[in-house]
Structures are given as structure tokens and as C-alpha cells.
Image (spheres, grey):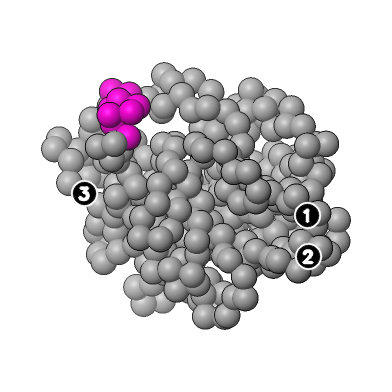
Amino acid sequence: MIPGEPLGAGIRIFAVSDLHVDYSSNMDWVNALPGNDHAQDILIVAGDVTHDLERLKSALGTLREKFARVCYVPGNHELWIDRRETQHSLDKFHEVLALCRSLAVNVEPERVSRPDGTAVWVVPLYSWYVTPEEGHGSLFAPKPGEDPSLRMWADRYYVKWPPQPGSQRAADYFLQLNEAWVQRPYDAPVISFSHFLPRADLMLRTPFERSRYGNGPRDPYPEFNFSRVAGCSALDDQLRRIGSSVHVYGHQHRNRWRSIDGVLYVSNCLGYPHAADGQESLPRRLWQVWGDRIPAH
Ligand SMILES: [Fe+2]
């Protein structure tokens, strides 16, 4: 399928994130996705496929064979580096983007049109989290008994930033990459996506969700406060400036389908294949976020 060429009238957009294909059962799940069903469809992959470039190439290449388009942003796992290497995580980020371009995986906004001329924009938003120590825009909420050192958080050991002139935060680096896309006009509905969370209120279940699904799993790590590394609120400013009607995100392994102030926020994480690490066991299927006959989630 040539980029820019109209897709079929029945085009659909699906979303998934956190494929974590380092787990063989997750890679098996990717390999088992039916290609014939999706030959006219778009798949949004909202980050955390793997830190391993060969495995990333294999997973994205497989998805690229099954879908007309694959749209992707790196997550924090993709930016992990071997501490023995001289490379830093921004080098890795750009290496991942170059790999995507070589596979014809979309890492920039694309207008997707139907034969009748109707269209939709799919817009990636790069991002990182703002810790409470970094100041404004953090999604931090205090948690009694938490360990503020984030001793359990693997990014502390596997993410290495280059020395920054001044005090630019990692999150600001990625947000400024989006600015050219945020400031341009869009002539059709916009679906945006990021790996990290754009809002603090997405972290917890609403009273309605609790009444329907319960409180979720017991907290296995009371000392770990996810809100320290969840995302940043400037992402929400950006997606609203571009007029997103749907925003897909990942990272938390908590699935959501929630409308807030005119935007539908969707998170559909494949997650880890076991619940022993405290993650919820999540339904393992793609979620349709655009197109005719969208099923309820
Ligand atoms: Fe993540």
C-alpha cells in the first residue's frame, strides 16, 4: 500500500500498546493476528514493544505485513540502553525512528482518505513523563508510604540522557518535537496517540468503572507510586490544540475507554502475560477506535 493512496471505504483504525514482545507468548499473539482481516486497516501501536532493536524490527515488520498502515511511537522500554554502551537514550530514540522509516511504519502525521474523499488524520505525539521533582506538568499524586527514590523503576537503570545545556527536561525535548505538528492545520478529524498518559484522572477508575469492574487488583507494590512516572499534562494541551477527537495512549497497563471534555481517551495494553507482577490481566484483542460499526469496549 503506497502512503497517501486512498484506502477502502470500510477502513477501520485499531489501537494497541505495550506489546512487550520480549515475552514469547506476546510475540506469538502478534504473529497470530489475522492479516486478511486487516489488509485495509490502520493499526496504532502506542509504544513499549521492546527494548531490543532486532525484536522491534521483527514485530513491527510482522504488523506491517498484516495492516495497510502501522502508526507508532516509542515508549520508555524502547529507549532502554545497555549501560556498557556509550550510546544514550536520545540516540536510541532516533535509531528507532530510522528503523521505523525503513519499515514504512508511520512515525509522523498522516492523512488517511477513503475513496469518497472523507479522511482522518493520525497524529503521533512523542512524550516522556515529568517527575514531581521536575516541577510543573507532572501527573504526580502523593501515596502514603511510597519510596520517592523509585528504586524499583527500571528506567532509573536503563535510561540515560545526554548532558543537557541548561535545564531542559526529557519531557520538554519530546514535546517540542511535536510543536510543528501541533501548530499546523488539520482538515479532517484527528486521532492522536502517545505512549505516556496525558492526564492524571486517567490513572484511577471512576466510580462508575469501579461499580462495573470492581477496584482492580490488589496493589502488590505499595512503595511504588506510578504517578511519578505516568506522563505529563502538556500532552493534553497539545492534543487539544490539534483538535483530537480520540487519543490513544499506553504505559499503565490499565485499559480505558473514557470521554472527557469532548475527547475519547483509549488505552488498550497487551501488557504482560502473567498477573504475578501485579498488572491486571487484560483482554488480548485489538480495539477499534475509528470507522463504521465501532463495538463498545
Ligand atoms: Fe511504558
Mark 3 crowdedness (10 Å alpha carbons): few <14, some 14-19, many ≥20: few
Amino acid residing under circle 2 = Asp
Cα gap from disc 2 to disc 3, whole angstroms? 47 Å
Disc 2 on helix, strand or loop? loop
Question: Start and end of the magenta stretch?
Answer: 209-218
> Which mark, by number, is residue 9?
1
In three-dimensional space, the C-alpha distance between marks 2 and 1, rounded to whole angstroms, equals: 7 Å
> Compared to 50, does 246 lie above or below?
below
**Is 80 included in the stretch rendered in magenta?**
no
- Which quadrant of the structure image shows residue 278? top left
Q: Which mark is residue 56?
A: none
Picture coordinates of residue 44 (x, y %)? 62, 50
| Tag shown at residue 141 | 3
Q: Indicate the amino acid at tag 3.
A: Ala
- Circle 2 crowding by C-alpha within 10 Å: few under 14, some 14–19, many from 20: few
Is the distance from the Cβ of mark 1 to the nearest ligand 1 atom less than 8 Å? no
129 on left or right of 70: left
Q: CA distance from mark 1 to mark 3?
A: 45 Å
Which percent across, then down, holds residue 27?
67, 30
Q: Secondary structure at mark 3?
A: loop
Do residues under tags 2 and 1 come within 8 Å of each other at their CB atoms? Answer: yes
Q: Please, what is the three-letter code of the amino acid marked with disc 1?
A: Ala
Give the numbered dot on residue 116: 2
Residue at 76%, 41% (x, y): give it. 38
Which of 178/11 is in front?
11
- Nearer the observer, 261 or 271: 261
Q: Earlier in the sequence, mark 1 or mark 3?
A: 1
The correct choice, above or below, for 33 with respect to 237 in the image is above
Nearer to us in this view, 70 or 160: 70
